[in-house]
Image (cartoon, coloured by chain):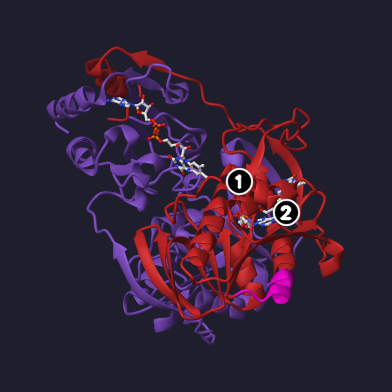
Amino acid sequence: MKVLVPVKRVVDYNVKVRVKSDGTGVELANVKMSMNPFDEIAVEEALRLKEAGKATEVVVVSIGPAQASETIRTALAMGADRGILVKAEGNVEPLAVAKILKAVVEAEQPGLVILGKQAIDDDSNQTGQMLAALLGWSQATFASKLEVEGSDFKVTREVDGGLQTIKLKGPAIVTTDLRLNEPRYASLPNIMKAKKKPIDDKSVADYGVDVTPRLEVLKTAEPAGRKAGVKVKDVAELVNKLKTEAGVL
Amino acid sequence: MTTLLIAEHDHETLKDSTNKALTAASQLGGDVHVLVAGGGQGTKAAAEAAAKLAGVSKVLVAEGPAYEHDLAEPLAALIVALAGGYDAFVAPATSRFKNVMPRVAALLDVMQVSEIIKVVAPDTYERPIYAGNAIQTVKSKDAKKVITVRTSTFAAAGEGGSAAIENAASAADPGLSTFVGEEVAKSDRPELTSAKIIVSGGRAMQSRENFAKYIEPLADKLGAGVGASRAAVDAGYAPNDWQVGQTGKVVAPELYVAVGISGAIQHLAGMKDSKVIVAINKDEDAPIFQVADYGLVADLYQAVPELTEALGKLGK
Ligand SMILES: Cc1cc2nc3c(=O)[nH]c(=O)nc-3n(C[C@H](O)[C@H](O)[C@H](O)COP(=O)(O)OP(=O)(O)OC[C@H]3O[C@@H](n4cnc5c(N)ncnc54)[C@H](O)[C@@H]3O)c2cc1C
Ligand SMILES: Cc1cc2nc3c(=O)[nH]c(=O)nc-3n(C[C@H](O)[C@H](O)[C@H](O)COP(=O)(O)OP(=O)(O)OC[C@H]3O[C@@H](n4cnc5c(N)ncnc54)[C@H](O)[C@@H]3O)c2cc1C
């Protein structure tokens, strides 16, 4: 079974992004970019399946600017076998990403696609579900445990009330939650090896997908700020303030 | 314009997140119909509750085993089968609808707008991006709209309606997934997303036992829900459904008490809209103090029992 893992290049999770003063977006020049953390978890899970003899090949794909090849290299250094870069400039919405991924899936024929549950920049939490819909495949979002059962899958999901376990008919779409695994760091020898692994260069035009955005961004603004309050000296003062000043007790 | 609101319920009672999403749905203008899809007898009771909500003009009920366990594929197929009669599809951004609505959107060839916090116009909404560090105003150019609603920012719609209840046209179950089991903790405490007060613990709690010994008694004194940071959940001190943050639950209670939580961007994203924030942390430079209304620099193992006791004296 081949496993396909879409990986996205996003602003590093440690960066506190700033809104551009003209309201046209957020400041992305000179900020540190990394692989979406949920995608690291997805790559890790695919590698573990391969190491357990359940998967034969791990292919990573990224849709984005030329620099997204760095994100692919990171996945290759973790241990993925090869990459596909679909070059796209500007804003590619989840629906368009899902359409491109559908074409990639049709060409690659994986038995499983593992995506992140959400990208930490746009926080849409959509792409995996959309891809499942377009392919007519089963889906398990927010996975905290994944087991292969022949060509089917058993997945435990993090849901609002706790955990849910479902069985999926393969081929299937799984999206990762935080507790699925702890991704490995790439070792230096593996980083060197990754430089020789193949990355297939594609463009959106190769897949004939219309990526015209459906959402028009009218404005990007700073959220209402919150000011630091006061420090209280002890529990008695805290209780007093909560009762008399804040009125929440 | 007619909007289909998909109801959140636990197959017995209608959830408060439905009332909040209804407020957003009503702001789109036009009629609002509610779809209640579930398994078993409780579905009817949830539908009756929905029919009483102010601003609902019709309730559609779909009852069947395919809808009993919130599987994405059959519910998406049902919503798509009903799509012809509707211009917009709205649901609360709970885990159930985060799972289902993008599937619906793709089947309708629509770009979903996730977790809106404000309706600016029927086709224009505000939504947070980058862990709430920026607020985007987006206009949807799709003919039909698919929207999930961040419930912490909308008031709950009240009762006062008397809508007709009809059976929904059925849709075939694609049969792609099956339910195996679930682990759902039953608790008498309020749910995080509707609690008026929340007490959350972080990595500093050190163990599940300490959560039970320090955080839970304080929460119970306050009649509060219990939350946690990701670090506490990852370490196994608290169950996953307690996680508050960018990638957990987003809450906005009257009072949020953060105990031994540093205040990482990802945690703040889930609680910074709380009305009053209290932080207890032994590090006076912890970033949580930058958003706290009341900060107490102290060792939680002393301060929390003292606070619990002081509240007891207040008759809590
Ligand atoms: C150059 C550039 C400019 C952009 N400008 C804007 C902007 O101005 N406003 C704005 O809102 N957004 C902008 N984006 C982000 C773009 O809109 C998002 O990629 C898109 O909306 C997807 O949303 P998401 O990542 O939140 O999807 P989610 O559904 O949250 O992502 C879930 C998962 O889908 C997969 N995935 C998603 N996208 C990709 C991808 N590109 N390649 C491979 N796998 C992927 C990953 O596995 C990811 O974990 C820009 C992106 C780029 C590359
Ligand atoms: C992709 C991604 C998603 C994430 N999503 C979330 C999310 O949804 N929610 C979330 O919370 N985090 C999330 N995080 C994690 C986040 O970045 C932080 O790592 C996490 O919030 C830290 O948890 P903490 O504050 O409990 O632990 P720490 O940062 O370790 O803070 C512990 C605090 O306890 C204090 N302390 C220690 N001992 C005591 C004592 N005896 N008395 C009083 N105070 C004490 C310390 O001073 C410190 O400030 C995410 C991270 C990533 C990469």
Amino acid, disc 1:
Pro
Residue A73, relative to residue B179: is it above or below?
A: above
Residue A23: image tag: none
Examine the residues drawn in magenta and state their main secondary structure. Answer: helix
Q: Tell me the magenta residue range.
A: A102-110
Task: Confirm whether residue B274 shows in the render.
Answer: yes
- The verdict on residue A104 being magenta is yes
Which residue extends farthest right? Answer: A205
Residue B50, relative to residue A40: is it above or below?
A: below
Is A179 on the left or on the right of B33, as rendered?
left
- The verdict on residue B178 being magenta is no
Give SS at disc 2.
loop
Residue A181 pos. (x, y %): 44, 54
Is B249 on the left or on the right of A223, as rendered?
left
Residue B145, relative to residue A169: is it above or below?
A: above
The residue sitting at 74% across, 50% down in the picture is A69
Residue A207 pos. (x, y %): 82, 69
Task: Confirm whether residue B98 shows in the render.
Answer: no
Residue B312 image-quadrant placement: top left
Quick one: quadrant of the C terminus of chain A? top left
The residue sitting at 12% across, 26% down in the picture is B313
Residue B299 pos. (x, y %): 26, 21
Residue B191 pos. (x, y %): 33, 51
Residue A189: image tag: 1
Figure chain in red? A
